[in-house]
Amino acid sequence: MEKQLGGYIGKVLRVKLNEGRLLEEDLDPIMCRRFLGGAGFIAHYLMQEVPAGIDPLGAENKLIFASGPVTGTSVPGCGRHAVGAVSPLTNGVAKCEVGEYWGAILKRAGFDVVIVEGRSDSPVYLAIRDGKAEIRPAGHLWGKTTKETQEAIRKELNSSKFRLSMIGPGGENLVPYACIMSGLTDAAGRGGLGAVMGSKNLKAIAVKGKKSPAPANPEGIRDIGRWFKENAGALSGLSDLGTSPTQPQFSEIGNLPVKNYRDGDFPNAYNITSNYIKETIRTGMEGCWCCPIKCKKVVSVEAPYEVDPAYGGPEYETLGALGSNCGIDDVIAIARGSQLCNAYSLDTISTGMSISFAMECFENGLITKQDTGGIDLRFGNAEAMLEVIELIARRKGIGELLSLGSAKAAKQIGPEAEKYAIHVKGLELPMHEPRLNQGLGLGYMVCPTGADHMLNMVDIVFSGLGSAEMTTVPDAIPLGVEPAPFRSIGPAKVRLLATFMQKRIIQDAMVLCGMMPYSFMQMTKIIRDVTGFNTTEAEQLRVGERILTAMRMINVERGIGTEADILPKRFFQPRKGGPFGGFLDQTQMDEAKQCYYQMMGWDRDGVPSRARLEELALV
């Protein structure tokens, strides 16, 4: 990088595993301006360097770890980095943002980006310390849990200060929804990035360093810190309880997934809340790099299941996926399931959804005890849920089938099972109900990574749990976006979704925590103060469009188009019981999808036009 930009180290590390070589490159300043960092860098490198026809678990796939300009600064919420590749679960683009300390320390260790190419003949791990990197043997680590791996590598490198990004047996065994763990509590969870890491025989990347890039305008960064301190009261609930106090309210309004999104009633919703966890098994709260919120639970249990506090505790998505969605209200069993997923490096959402799919198949006679090895795989059976997680990680017994994910498992079982596979593009749904949140449902349809709630809007968040008639978006109104009715999927809601997705992808490029209360104008100011770019909100919206369109092109070139932009048929039918009897209208959702395409400059098949690609400098 000829001219050092604020916030960036300016270095890319290429890890050529098939050759055992490490190469350093300068970070391109023009690319930084166009794609910013994080998810933007992932879109750029995948679009430019990964051929369309490659096998996601083959040597030609590239695994990209990318910080953003904000990563590792003193901006509250800056302790995140992004990871991406072609997904073995969806066959399209996969990208995740993850917290903890790893991304900040990668930058201090001397690199903004690590691109892992090829495949090692034997297991290895990568150690990066103060600008120097080396590939080290990891055969003795293969098969170990994430905690065992972290302890062993820190001992070998003679420092407990190393931060690790790593896989457990789920990633080694190429479970298509295996995740990459950042430490023992934070996951790059969706799309099977852990399987890509395992396919390369890469066990871990350990980082340590102290080189910190300076922001272009330090006083501006101090200003945002002061503002945050004065306004952090709005996040006090996160500090006290974390992300999951709302299950009873969600149950009352129809947002809580129950029994594979089939049912509406879950009487013991309080038993899977952070309030109940605080009263029973919680021992503390932790946070990410430079974040005063500390929203992550730590739990400890000795019986009836042992739960190690080193693995943190279950957050909202996990409590839903392994809890209500499986008909389970035993919070200790859910905490144990959360630990198993973190230890084995499995995405808790896809794991829980694959198990709930199997439970519904079991209750309808499509899977029998002969198939499960005697496990009574019924909704509500917590012991069965825990047994199946173990089998999925090892790909043994019924776990071999369920390790494929619900979409591919359904195809193996037969056509009758496909209606119970709740996914978009092969990626299982997170724990938010699209029947209630129509904008969210459209977001699931058009999101490049599949059913993703983070690169999306949740309608009820804008309207006080659905109680208000109108959706309000105070920080988007100056950008020309008007409020949209809550129970609507007309053009106003589509425009709101499109704009909010652009805001979200900019957060993922910065890389900035999505829980932070910054307006889009504040985000743009943070980018200016960190990088020195004389940028505007209009330019950042264009950056967001560019990243989303690049991701769309990656999918289109891999044959993933409008036919994949669909929701499961389940959501066009009412739930069984519960307070909310609404459901989606197929014609309205199809019209909304076409409206979204037009707003993005794509044709009726969802393919970006040549003019649009030229406008966004993508050709």
Image (cartoon, rainbow, N blue to C red):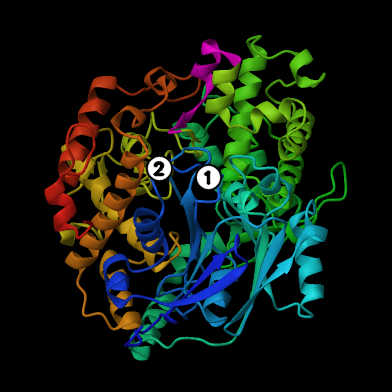
Residue 280 located left or right of residue 541: right
- Tell me what residue is drawn at x 74 percent, y 57 percent: 146
Judging depth in this view, the residue of 25 and 464 nearest the camera is 25
Q: Is residue 149 visible?
A: yes
Identify the mark at residue 477; answer none if there is no mark: none
Q: Residue 132's spot in the image, x, y percent?
A: 60, 82
Crowding at dot 2, Cα within 10 Å, few <14 / some 14-19 / many 20+, comes out as: some
Q: Is residue 267 visible?
A: no
Identify the residue at the far front of this view.
19
Q: Residue 209's spot in the image, x, y percent?
A: 61, 83
Tell me the quadrant of the picture where the N terminus can be found. Answer: bottom left
> What kind of element bears circle 1?
loop
Under mark 2, the amino acid is Leu
| Residues at circles 2 and 1 in contact by the CB criterion of under 8 Å | yes
Q: What residue is pinned by disc 1?
A: 246
Q: Which residues are magenta?
A: 413-425
Under mark 1, the amino acid is Thr
Residue 505 located left or right of residue 86: left
Cα–Cα span, label 2 and label 1: 10 Å
- Tell me what residue is drawn at x 74 percent, y 26 percent: 381
> What kind of element bears circle 2?
loop
Judging depth in this view, the residue of 494 and 109 nearest the camera is 109
Q: What residue is pinned by disc 2?
A: 465
Crowding at dot 1, Cα within 10 Å, few <14 / some 14-19 / many 20+, comes out as: some
Residue 590 sits above or below residue 195 on the image: above
